[in-house]
């Protein structure tokens, strides 16, 4: 009897392990996944079929074809289905083209939120602060720190780094170059230069220029002028936001950056910070990743007390889609995750998501009327500062209390846990895909042994 029970136990464990291992595979980048698929005749032929099916057809038309449907089902079991890309990787565009060739066939029409094709971000703001402190020094006088122009300090810090100075000077030159009396600049070249700057310069420099905290209007205007908005952002008229989104989604890079923004900045009311996985860094990186595309966001005014960002669009002329348009626009203009992340970086704070940490309510910055813009002063792009560059100060350094300042929305200690943000994934029913790790069988072992003992 004991031998029989032991045999049944071993058979159960073997079956469970085989079932859980089936379908699970470590994710790879889409370029590598494509190479693996090409080496397998069944996968490569089905992938060619699917690409032909997607050419010039919508999803419903494609799935009406049995051959197309069969190809999609086979590819859902291949490494191509789980593949992801890295932002700034050498073959990023090729990787994204492969990703969307699979996932566009899995979506029900045009979804409001799309899953990010990029690998989850695991770094935190605290990592950026540690890197920034190397260049700026610590222990600054709080009185001096409060009065300093952090955005000017950020520009000076950039000029002390050869790569940052070179790429910043490049986009300033290109975006300021007037083409004719009717065309103030070449926006396409300006966008390309901005993408190179934000993709190739370390975030300890770019974040300080984009998200510097300000005490006055002059500082806030410098922050708004970081991306040269007269060329890269503004236009004669504002297009409809849904039309702008549709235009963005025709380009694989723009579509991917927008999906990444929604994945990492979509307001969550189940987390302490309103950010997915309480990761400010992931949200700020996704925001910066959209600069240099049709969906480029920027600060709407030069107010130092109110943080409102938006793409250059409105919901005028939305017709019966006005509600959806307003919802899309609010993800920028009234997004507590994004606002808290920008303020947290400016204050030099990250969030502690430990269960023992006290729960603070985020202070919402009050809205103020739009103030006149100050002329942009870009003279520091060629002059090097010799003074010590101060970091964005923390709440403790400024001598402020949490929730008492108009500038702040969150005040927490540095992060002590590491949470990988989740990713939304569309899985076709009955696809048989399982990503569970082979551990459940072992968790059942004590219960089975107890049963045998009884």
Image (spheres, rainbow, N blue to C red):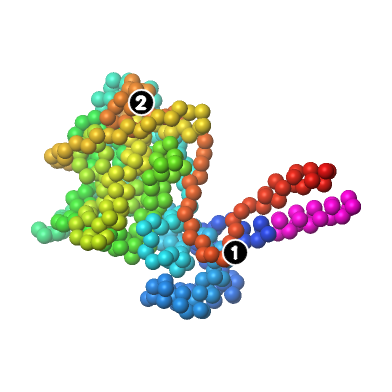
Cα–Cα gap, marks 1 and 2: 50 Å
* Count of marks overlaid on the render: 2
The residue where tag 1 is placed is 432
* Along the viewing direction, whichever of 100 and 160 lies nearer the viewer: 100
Residue 222 location in percent, x, y? 22, 39
Q: Is residue 211 rendered magenta in the image? A: no
Position of residue 128 measured from the top left corner of the image (x, y, whole percent) = 42, 37
- Residue 211 is left or right of residue 353, and the answer is left
Report the mark closest to the observer, 1 or 2: 1
Residue 396 appears in which quarter of the rendering?
top left
Q: Tag 2 or tag 1, which sits nearer the N-term?
A: 2
Residue 291's spot in the image, x, y percent? 31, 51
Which residue sits at x=16%, y=40%? 370
Looking at the image, residue 333 lies above or below residue 432: above
Can the viewer see residue 346?
A: no
In the picture shown, does residue 71 fall above or below 87?
A: below
Q: In the rendered structure, which segment of residues is drawn in magenta? A: 1-18
Q: In this figure, which residue is indicated by the disc labeled 2?
A: 402
Q: Residue at x 90, y 52 (%)?
A: 1
Determine if the magenta segment contains residue 10: yes
């Amino acid at each position: 009897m004991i031998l029989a029970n032991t045999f049944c136990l071993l058979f159960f464990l073997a079956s469970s392990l085989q079932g859980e291992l089936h379908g699970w595979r470590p994710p790879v980048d889409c370029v590598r996944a494509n190479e693996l698929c090409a080496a397998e005749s069944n996968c490569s032929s089905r992938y060619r079929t699917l690409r032909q099916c997607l050419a010039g057809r919508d999803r419903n038309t494609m799935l009406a074809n049995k051959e197309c449907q069969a190809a999609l089902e086979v590819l859902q079991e291949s490494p191509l289905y789980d593949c992801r890309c890295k932002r700034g990787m050498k073959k990023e565009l090729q990787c994204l083209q492969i990703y969307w060739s699979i996932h566009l066939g899995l979506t029900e029409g045009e979804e409001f939120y799309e899953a990010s094709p990029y690998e989850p971000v695991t770094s935190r703001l605290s990592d950026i602060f540690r890197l920034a402190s190397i260049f700026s020094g610590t222990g600054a006088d709080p009185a001096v720190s409060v009065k300093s122009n952090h955005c000017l300090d950020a520009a000076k810090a950039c000029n002390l780094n050869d790569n940052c100075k070179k790429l910043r000077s490049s986009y300033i030159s290109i975006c300021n170059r007037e083409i004719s009396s009717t065309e103030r600049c070449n926006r396409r070249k300006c966008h390309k230069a901005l993408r190179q700057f934000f993709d190739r310069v370390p975030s300890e420099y770019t974040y300080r220029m984009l998200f510097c905290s300000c005490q006055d209007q002059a500082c806030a205007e410098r922050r708004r002028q970081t991306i040269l908005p007269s060329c890269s952002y503004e236009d004669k008229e504002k297009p409809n936001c849904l039309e702008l989104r549709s235009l963005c989604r025709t380009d694989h890079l723009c579509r991917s950056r927008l999906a990444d923004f929604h994945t990492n900045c979509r307001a969550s009311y189940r987390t302490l910070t309103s950010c997915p996985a309480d990761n400010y860094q992931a949200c700020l990186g996704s925001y910066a990743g959209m600069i240099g595309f049709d969906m480029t966001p920027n600060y709407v005014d030069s107010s130092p007390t109110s943080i409102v960002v938006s793409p250059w669009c409105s919901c005028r002329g939305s017709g019966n889609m006005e509600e959806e348009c307003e919802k899309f626009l609010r993800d920028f203009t009234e997004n507590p995750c994004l606002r808290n992340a920008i303020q947290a970086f400016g204050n030099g704070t990250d969030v502690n998501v430990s269960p023992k940490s006290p729960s603070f309510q985020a202070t919402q910055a009050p809205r103020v009327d739009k103030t006149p813009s100050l002329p942009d002063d870009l003279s520091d792009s060629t002059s090097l500062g010799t003074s010590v560059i101060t970091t964005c100060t923390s709440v403790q350094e400024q001598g402020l209390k949490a929730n008492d300042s108009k500038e702040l929305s969150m005040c927490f200690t540095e992060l002590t846990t590491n949470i990988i943000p989740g990713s939304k994934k569309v899985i076709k029913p009955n696809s048989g895909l399982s990503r569970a790790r082979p551990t459940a069988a072992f968790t059942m072992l004590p219960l089975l042994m107890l049963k045998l003992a009884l």
